Image (cartoon, rainbow, N blue to C red):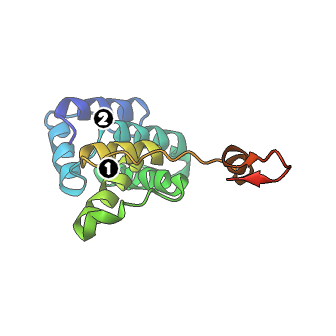
Amino acid sequence: MLSNQQMVTVLRYLKAANLSGPIEEGQAAVWVDALAAKMPNLRIEDAQAACREMVTSRSAAKGNTWITPGDLIDEVKRIRSKRLDSAGTLPEAPTYLGVDGEREWTRRIRALVGDGLTADDAAKRARSAMKIPEPEHVETVPIAGLLNKTLKPRPSGGVSA
């Protein structure tokens, strides 16, 4: 959740871009309250990204008016959704977690990728938070290389195992 001071920073940015009116006393607290009701885990990084996007895409010539808390929420949702779409296939939960564990895994992965992490980094963080051990690394060897390592030539020209 954003603090009042963080919200003042956001409002000043919007005001400087002429997308907000004068900043009144108590306005930041009202915005924080409105945003927390719809998006309680809103991060300052997402709010700033949304403001940058709105500043570059809106103009008075198009009839756009001042930005509201609802506009900010809509833009943050769009940005987070775009991050999830761009990530492609998300890492699957380990099969032994069960239904509740899989649900928690999926929630964490989606939140972390929405925050801007790569799918791999999100999986590492989710494993750490859920105390799931890292999967063991399995070295793969081409079959020809494996045969060369395991089969020894016979003195008579054949091979033995």
Distance CA(mark 2)–CA(mark 1): 10 Å
Residue labelled with disc 2: 11
Q: Residue furthest front?
A: 156
Element at badge 1? loop
Q: Position of residue 55 (x, y in %)?
A: 48, 39
> Is residue 61 visible in this depiction of the protein?
yes
Q: Do labels 2 and 1 touch, CB within 8 Å? A: no
**Nearest to the observer: residue 4 or residue 77:** 77
Q: Does residue 90 appear left or right of residue 103 in this picture?
A: right
Residue labelled with disc 1: 68
Q: Amino acid at mark 1?
A: Thr
Q: How many marks?
A: 2
Element at badge 2? helix
Question: Which residue sits at x=85%, y=49%?
Answer: 156
Q: Does residue 70 appear left or right of residue 144 in this picture?
A: left
Please tell me which of labels 2 and 1 falls first in the chain: 2
